[in-house]
Amino acid sequence: MAHLYVHIPFCHRICPYCAFFKHTPADTDMRGFVRAIVQEARLRLPQGYAPETIYFGGGTPSMLSPTHLGNMIRGLEEVVDFSQVREWSFESNPATFTAEKVQQWRELGITRVSLGVQSFEPRLLQLLGRTHSPEEVVRDVELLRRIGIPQINIDLMFSLPGQTISEWEHTLQTALSLAPEHISTYNLSYEEDTAFYRQFGSGAGDEETDVRMFEMSDDILTAAGYRHYEISNYALPGCRSLHNLACWRGEDYYALGSGAVGSVAGVRYQNSGDTTTYIRTICDGGLPPGTSERLRPETRRTELLGLMLRTDEGLPPQMIRPEDTAFVAMLQQENLATLSADGRLLLTRSGRLVADEIAVGLL
């Protein structure tokens, strides 16, 4: 399976909770950045590379102007065979795109737009540093529908500082009223090097509230027909994120862009998080500076345990060792996991609440 990730690191402003590599455009040479993405594809991708999924993440890819995005895709088409693409996801923030942009996305072949909504409570949006309003989200979803984007994802966050149970329920119900094909619900974590970490330390919430909000998400969204196919992700039938599934299954993917992380043939690489250096180095004829490491088998297994256990596909039997038998039996006895007919280890809802601890127990 072939997959491609393109990192667009630009944001209008830096949200206080976000730990992804991103920055404001400032005086970035945008035309140079577009050329660098295309040139990196020429240098890094195999000839005739034909991905099944493409994911434009960030940052805020929807900040790209129609001219810059069009030039980027025309350049990539000289390197990448787009004929096999089954899913093309494009991250966006509400109120950062127009009908002209969405029309271009549709004409390019983008099939899935992921909206960084986070909340439908104005005070929480302000706390999160978001510049959109709940009303703008509604208008944007209507715009995406009218122009014909096939699938919409809405990203939401819970366990925010001061967030109440009733506010989370209102956010979930409002998201449902927009009938997106996919909803992601993320438990806020306080990452180092973010303003939230400096302000709140390692966390402002409590475990009981985390559990209540997680269970509320599961109850409300599954009752509405969404499949809880990964700890933080819900999809209507046939609308799971194919790109993210590939990553959770440990499949290879190439990544382009400053700060991008890829994993191919047992080697993980990360491009430098300096966009100016990224542009200059590639335009001088070389791959961008960064790091790479060959993953040892035990490292690979550790990572796959953590990823696969999060999904409703569970852990395949070949990853369960004889020495894990007693631990697996304990998980079943404690109603934290079950074994499917074909031997896959599947976490129950209670098990998903302690998925990381279970993964550690299987190391």
Image (spheres, rainbow, N blue to C red):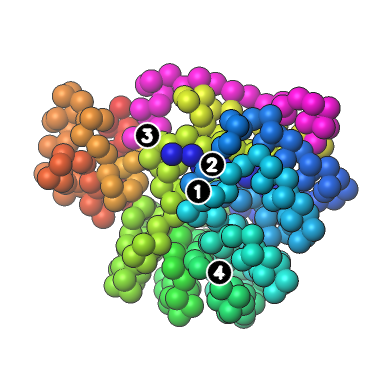
In this view, the residue in front, 362 or 55, is: 55
What number is the disc on residue 50? 2
Residue hosting label 4: 149
Mark pair 1, 2: CA separation: 6 Å
Q: Residues within 10 Å of mark 4 (few under 14, many from 20)?
A: many
Expressed as whole percent of the image width and height from the top left, the position of residue 255 reads 60, 38
Label 1 close to label 3 by CB (< 8 Å): no
- Vertical side of 274 occupied by 204: above or below: below
Give amino acid for label 4: Ile
Which span of residues is magenta-colored? 279-305
* Precedes in sequence: disc 3 or disc 4: 4
Q: Nearer the viewer, mark 1 or mark 3?
A: 1
In this view, the residue in front, 44 or 299, is: 44
Mark pair 3, 2: CA separation: 25 Å
Q: Secondary structure at mark 3?
A: helix
Q: Residue, x 79% and y 26% (percent of image)?
A: 285
Give amino acid for label 3: Leu
Label 3 close to label 2 by CB (< 8 Å): no
In which image quadrant can residue 217 be found?
Answer: bottom left
Label 1 close to label 2 by CB (< 8 Å): yes
* Precedes in sequence: disc 4 or disc 2: 2
Q: Residues within 10 Å of mark 2 (few under 14, many from 20)?
A: some
Q: Residue, x 64% and y 65% (percent of image)?
A: 107
Quarter of the picture containing the N terminus is top left
Q: Nearer the viewer, mark 4 or mark 2?
A: 2
- Vertical side of 240 occupied by 336: above or below: above
- Vertical side of 186 occupied by 53: above or below: above
Residue hosting label 3: 304
Residue hosting label 1: 84
Mark pair 1, 3: CA separation: 26 Å
Expressed as whole percent of the image width and height from the top left, the position of residue 330 reads 14, 38
